[in-house]
Image (tube, rainbow, N blue to C red):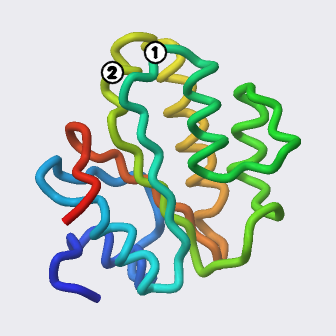
Protein backbone atom coordinates (compact mmCIF):
# COMPACT_ATOMS: atom_id res chain seq x y z
CA UNK A 1 0.00 0.00 0.00
CA UNK A 2 1.35 3.43 -0.90
CA UNK A 3 2.45 5.60 2.03
CA UNK A 4 0.25 8.41 0.67
CA UNK A 5 -2.90 6.41 1.39
CA UNK A 6 -4.50 7.48 4.67
CA UNK A 7 -4.56 4.69 7.26
CA UNK A 8 -8.38 4.45 7.34
CA UNK A 9 -8.58 3.73 3.60
CA UNK A 10 -5.56 1.41 3.67
CA UNK A 11 -7.18 -0.64 6.45
CA UNK A 12 -10.38 -1.05 4.44
CA UNK A 13 -8.61 -1.95 1.20
CA UNK A 14 -6.49 -4.64 2.84
CA UNK A 15 -9.41 -6.08 4.82
CA UNK A 16 -8.37 -5.08 8.35
CA UNK A 17 -11.50 -3.01 8.88
CA UNK A 18 -15.00 -3.06 7.36
CA UNK A 19 -15.88 -0.78 4.46
CA UNK A 20 -17.76 2.40 5.22
CA UNK A 21 -18.13 6.10 4.45
CA UNK A 22 -14.82 7.91 4.85
CA UNK A 23 -13.75 11.57 4.69
CA UNK A 24 -11.01 12.73 2.32
CA UNK A 25 -9.07 15.95 2.84
CA UNK A 26 -9.51 18.74 0.30
CA UNK A 27 -5.75 19.06 -0.21
CA UNK A 28 -5.31 15.40 -1.21
CA UNK A 29 -5.79 14.35 -4.82
CA UNK A 30 -8.66 11.91 -5.22
CA UNK A 31 -6.48 10.15 -7.76
CA UNK A 32 -4.56 8.76 -4.75
CA UNK A 33 -7.67 7.04 -3.44
CA UNK A 34 -8.63 5.69 -6.86
CA UNK A 35 -5.09 4.41 -7.49
CA UNK A 36 -4.95 2.73 -4.08
CA UNK A 37 -8.26 1.01 -4.81
CA UNK A 38 -7.05 -0.15 -8.21
CA UNK A 39 -3.78 -1.44 -6.71
CA UNK A 40 -5.80 -3.45 -4.17
CA UNK A 41 -7.94 -5.06 -6.89
CA UNK A 42 -10.93 -2.80 -6.30
CA UNK A 43 -12.78 -0.76 -8.91
CA UNK A 44 -13.18 2.96 -8.40
CA UNK A 45 -15.33 5.78 -9.70
CA UNK A 46 -15.37 9.52 -9.14
CA UNK A 47 -18.72 11.30 -8.86
CA UNK A 48 -18.32 15.07 -9.27
CA UNK A 49 -21.40 16.90 -8.02
CA UNK A 50 -20.11 20.45 -8.58
CA UNK A 51 -22.99 22.55 -9.85
CA UNK A 52 -25.68 19.97 -9.08
CA UNK A 53 -28.75 21.59 -7.51
CA UNK A 54 -31.56 19.10 -8.10
CA UNK A 55 -32.42 15.43 -7.93
CA UNK A 56 -32.61 14.91 -11.69
CA UNK A 57 -29.10 16.26 -12.26
CA UNK A 58 -27.78 14.27 -9.29
CA UNK A 59 -29.20 11.01 -10.62
CA UNK A 60 -27.92 11.76 -14.14
CA UNK A 61 -24.41 12.36 -12.77
CA UNK A 62 -24.61 9.08 -10.84
CA UNK A 63 -25.71 7.18 -13.93
CA UNK A 64 -22.84 8.61 -15.99
CA UNK A 65 -20.08 8.35 -13.37
CA UNK A 66 -20.99 4.83 -12.28
CA UNK A 67 -21.90 3.63 -15.76
CA UNK A 68 -25.29 2.41 -14.60
CA UNK A 69 -27.14 0.03 -16.91
CA UNK A 70 -29.65 1.42 -19.43
CA UNK A 71 -32.55 0.24 -17.28
CA UNK A 72 -31.61 2.63 -14.42
CA UNK A 73 -34.89 4.34 -13.50
CA UNK A 74 -33.55 7.75 -12.37
CA UNK A 75 -35.25 7.66 -8.95
CA UNK A 76 -34.14 6.95 -5.39
CA UNK A 77 -35.27 3.31 -5.45
CA UNK A 78 -33.39 2.69 -8.69
CA UNK A 79 -30.25 4.26 -7.21
CA UNK A 80 -30.52 1.99 -4.17
CA UNK A 81 -31.11 -1.03 -6.42
CA UNK A 82 -28.07 -0.30 -8.60
CA UNK A 83 -25.85 0.14 -5.55
CA UNK A 84 -26.97 -3.08 -3.88
CA UNK A 85 -27.28 -5.34 -6.94
CA UNK A 86 -23.98 -5.05 -8.76
CA UNK A 87 -24.68 -7.85 -11.26
CA UNK A 88 -24.51 -5.20 -13.98
CA UNK A 89 -20.82 -4.40 -13.37
CA UNK A 90 -17.62 -6.43 -13.62
CA UNK A 91 -16.55 -8.42 -10.55
CA UNK A 92 -13.98 -6.89 -8.20
CA UNK A 93 -12.63 -7.35 -4.66
CA UNK A 94 -14.47 -4.19 -3.70
CA UNK A 95 -15.75 -0.89 -5.00
CA UNK A 96 -14.76 2.67 -4.14
CA UNK A 97 -16.92 5.70 -4.89
CA UNK A 98 -15.28 9.09 -4.40
CA UNK A 99 -17.77 11.97 -4.26
CA UNK A 100 -16.52 15.51 -4.82
CA UNK A 101 -18.31 18.84 -4.98
CA UNK A 102 -21.19 17.51 -2.88
CA UNK A 103 -21.49 20.41 -0.46
CA UNK A 104 -23.42 22.67 -2.86
CA UNK A 105 -26.03 20.02 -3.55
CA UNK A 106 -26.31 19.20 0.15
CA UNK A 107 -26.90 22.90 0.93
CA UNK A 108 -29.29 23.50 -2.01
CA UNK A 109 -31.57 20.54 -1.31
CA UNK A 110 -30.92 19.26 2.22
CA UNK A 111 -33.95 16.93 2.18
CA UNK A 112 -32.69 15.20 -0.96
CA UNK A 113 -29.17 15.09 0.42
CA UNK A 114 -30.53 13.31 3.48
CA UNK A 115 -32.01 10.68 1.15
CA UNK A 116 -28.67 10.35 -0.65
CA UNK A 117 -26.84 9.85 2.65
CA UNK A 118 -29.34 7.17 3.62
CA UNK A 119 -29.04 5.35 0.29
CA UNK A 120 -25.24 5.42 0.48
CA UNK A 121 -25.21 4.22 4.10
CA UNK A 122 -27.63 1.40 3.27
CA UNK A 123 -25.54 0.34 0.26
CA UNK A 124 -22.33 0.35 2.32
CA UNK A 125 -24.10 -1.70 5.00
CA UNK A 126 -25.45 -4.12 2.41
CA UNK A 127 -21.92 -4.98 1.21
CA UNK A 128 -20.15 -4.77 4.59
CA UNK A 129 -20.17 -8.47 5.46
CA UNK A 130 -19.55 -9.76 1.96
CA UNK A 131 -16.45 -10.45 -0.11
CA UNK A 132 -17.14 -7.28 -2.10
CA UNK A 133 -17.02 -4.16 0.08
CA UNK A 134 -18.26 -0.72 -0.88
CA UNK A 135 -16.40 2.37 0.34
CA UNK A 136 -17.72 5.87 -0.19
CA UNK A 137 -15.30 8.77 0.22
CA UNK A 138 -16.75 12.20 0.81
CA UNK A 139 -13.96 14.42 -0.50
CA UNK A 140 -13.46 17.67 1.36
CA UNK A 141 -13.93 20.85 -0.62
CA UNK A 142 -14.24 20.19 -4.31
CA UNK A 143 -11.62 17.48 -4.22
CA UNK A 144 -8.49 17.67 -6.32
CA UNK A 145 -8.75 15.57 -9.43
CA UNK A 146 -5.05 15.21 -10.19
CA UNK A 147 -1.73 14.91 -8.45
View extreme (left): residue? 27
114 vs 50, left or right, is right
**Alpha carbons under labels 2 and 1: distance apart:** 7 Å
Mark 2: few/some/many CA within 10 Å (<14, 14-19, 20+): some
Mark 1: few/some/many CA within 10 Å (<14, 14-19, 20+): some
Q: Residue placed at 66% from the left, 73% from the top?
A: 130
Q: Residue placed at 57% from the left, 73% from the top?
A: 94
Q: Is residue 39 above or below residue 36?
A: below
Q: Quadrant of the C terminus?
A: bottom left
Q: Secondary structure at mark 1?
A: loop
Q: Is residue 87 above or below residue 22?
A: below
Q: Residue placed at 73% from the left, 73% from the top?
A: 90
Give the x, y percent position of residue 116: 54, 30
- Residue with the mark numbered 1: 53
144 vs 36, left or right, is left
Name which quarter of the figure residue 56 lies in: top right
Q: Quadrant of the N terminus?
A: bottom left
Q: Secondary structure at mark 2?
A: helix
Earlier residue among tags 2 and 1: 1
Task: Say which of 45 and 123 sits in front.
Answer: 45
- Residue with the mark numbered 2: 104
Name which quarter of the figure residue 11 lies in: bottom left
How many tags in the picture? 2
Give the x, y percent position of residue 55: 59, 18
91 vs 10, left or right, is right
128 vs 86, left or right, is left
Name which quarter of the figure residue 101 lies in: top left
Give the x, y percent position of residue 54: 53, 14
Give the x, y percent position of residue 52: 45, 22
Q: Residue placed at 78% from the left, 44% from the top?
A: 81
Q: Are marks 2 and 1 in contact (CB under 8 Å)?
A: yes
Q: Is residue 15 above or below residue 87?
A: below
Amino acid sequence: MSPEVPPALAAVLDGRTPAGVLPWPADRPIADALAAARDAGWTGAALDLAGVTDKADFLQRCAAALDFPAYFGHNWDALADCLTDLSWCPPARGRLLVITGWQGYAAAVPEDWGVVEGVLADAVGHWRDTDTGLVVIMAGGRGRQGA
